[in-house]
Image (spheres, rainbow, N blue to C red):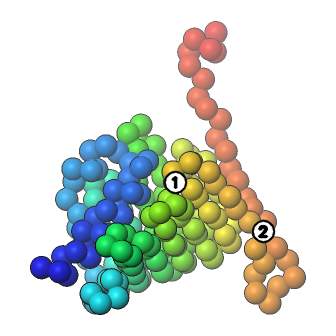
């Protein structure tokens, strides 16, 4: 029964990521597909390889490799690699929160989602792109940029697209 513990930690992670999710997602079943699975119970690690897809309600995570680590009986982190790895979810207002990058790291204790290499974060129709983005899911803070590409003298620029809030018909008059 111990190997099921790792699946429960993944389930806990998805609830943590669900801080900005559709409330109905919490009741949705969790589905995981991968070409391979390795559970290292002694190390509290589960590794999913090959076309990994995780879905729970509107939430979708995909990557080539996903590693879930536990610490002291609780979820510690999730590491996702892909070309690109992707995250997608709707909130209760049907607004899309999505991300993609070659590497994603999520720390459950801090609620920090870190996107590295060709990172893109879409939130409420607004778009942030950079080689490095840090998104604090608990405090809703986005930080991007200030990291040099190896073997380059240039620091990649952060690109942001912000859409105006729609005006209500009362305000427009």
The relative height of residue 16 versus residue 67 in the rendered view (above or below) is above
Q: Does the CB distance between marks 2 and 1 fall below 8 Å?
A: no
- For the point 26% across and 44% down, which residue is it? 24
Quarter assignment of residue 63: bottom left
Q: Residue furthest front?
A: 72
Whether 30 is drawn above or below 83: the answer is above
* Residue 75 point in image, percent of width and height: 37, 70
- Say which quadrant the C terminus sits in: top right
Q: Nearer the viewer, residue 169 or 87?
A: 87
Look at 74% across and 66% down and name the residue there. Answer: 145
Q: Which residue is mark 1?
A: 137
- x, y percentage for residue 152? 82, 85
Residue 27 placement, left or right of 160: left
Residue occupying image coordinates x 56% and y 19%: 168
Crowding near pointer 1: few (<14 within 10 Å), some, many (20+)? Answer: some
Residue at 26% from the left image edge and 76% from the top image edge: 6
**Label annotation for residue 146:** 2
Does residue 99 show up? Answer: no
Q: Position of residue 112 (x, y in %)?
A: 54, 62
Percent of width and height locating residue 157: 78, 66
């Amino acid at each position: 029964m111990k190997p099921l513990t790792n699946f429960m930690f993944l389930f806990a992670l998805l609830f943590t990521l669900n801080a900005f999710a559709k409330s109905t997602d919490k009741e949705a079943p969790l589905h995981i597909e991968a070409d391979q699975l390795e559970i290292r119970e002694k190390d509290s690690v589960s590794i999913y390889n090959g076309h990994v897809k995780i879905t729970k309600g509107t939430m979708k995570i995909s990557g080539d490799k996903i590693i879930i680590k536990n610490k002291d009986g609780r979820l510690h982190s999730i590491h996702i690699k892909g070309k690109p790895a992707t995250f997608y979810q709707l909130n209760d207002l049907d607004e899309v929160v999505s991300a993609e990058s070659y590497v994603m790291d999520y720390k459950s204790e801090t609620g920090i989602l870190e996107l590295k290499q060709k990172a893109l974060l879409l939130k409420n129709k607004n778009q942030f792109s950079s080689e490095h983005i840090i998104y604090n899911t608990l405090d809703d803070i986005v930080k991007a940029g200030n990291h040099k590409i190896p073997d380059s003298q240039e620091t990649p620029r952060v690109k942001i697209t912000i859409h105006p809030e729609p005006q209500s018909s009362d305000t427009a008059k």
